Image (cartoon, helix red, strand yellow):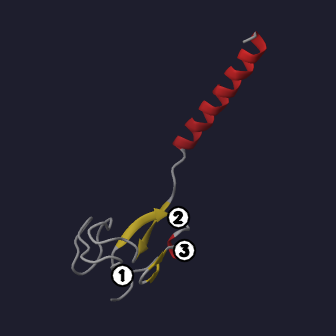
Amino acid sequence: MNSRTLAITAATLAALASGAALAADKKIEMEKCYGVSLAGKNDCAAGPGTTCAGTSKVDYQSNSWKNVPKGTCTTIKTPKGMGSLKSMKG
């Protein structure tokens, strides 16, 4: 490799490394999404019959929530309907 190729390669690797570092530092905003967690996989305080993480009894329990990336909840489709930003009855 000649010195110009090495310089370009080094600059490219440095740019990639700094981009990866910036991406790792960016924190993804999350929101509670009800009715999308599987049995025993809810994040916390799910309502009657559950006390905290992992205590939901059935898949897609309407009063249990899972943290999901902000803006995605209501687009999640389950066999029981779409995800909800609010606890649902039933």
* Image position of 82 (left or right of 40): right
Q: Which residue is mark 2?
A: 70
Which amino acid, by three-letter code, is at mark 2? Lys
Cα distance in 3D space between marks 2 and 1: 19 Å
Q: Nearer the viewer, residue 59 or 88?
A: 59
Q: Earlier in the sequence, mark 1 or mark 3?
A: 1
Q: Nearer the viewer, residue 7 or 44?
A: 7
Q: Earlier in the sequence, mark 3 or mark 2?
A: 2
Q: Quadrant of the N terminus?
A: top right
* Label 3 SS: helix
Q: Which mark is residue 75?
A: 3
* Label 1 SS: loop
Which amino acid, by three-letter code, is at mark 3? Thr
* Label 2 SS: loop
Q: Earlier in the sequence, mark 2 or mark 1?
A: 1
Q: Which mark is residue 73?
A: none
**Dot 1 crowding, Cα within 10 Å, few <14, some 14–19, many 20+:** many
Which amino acid, by three-letter code, is at mark 1? Ser
Residue at image x 54%, y 68%? 72
Q: Position of residue 74 (x, y in %)?
A: 52, 76
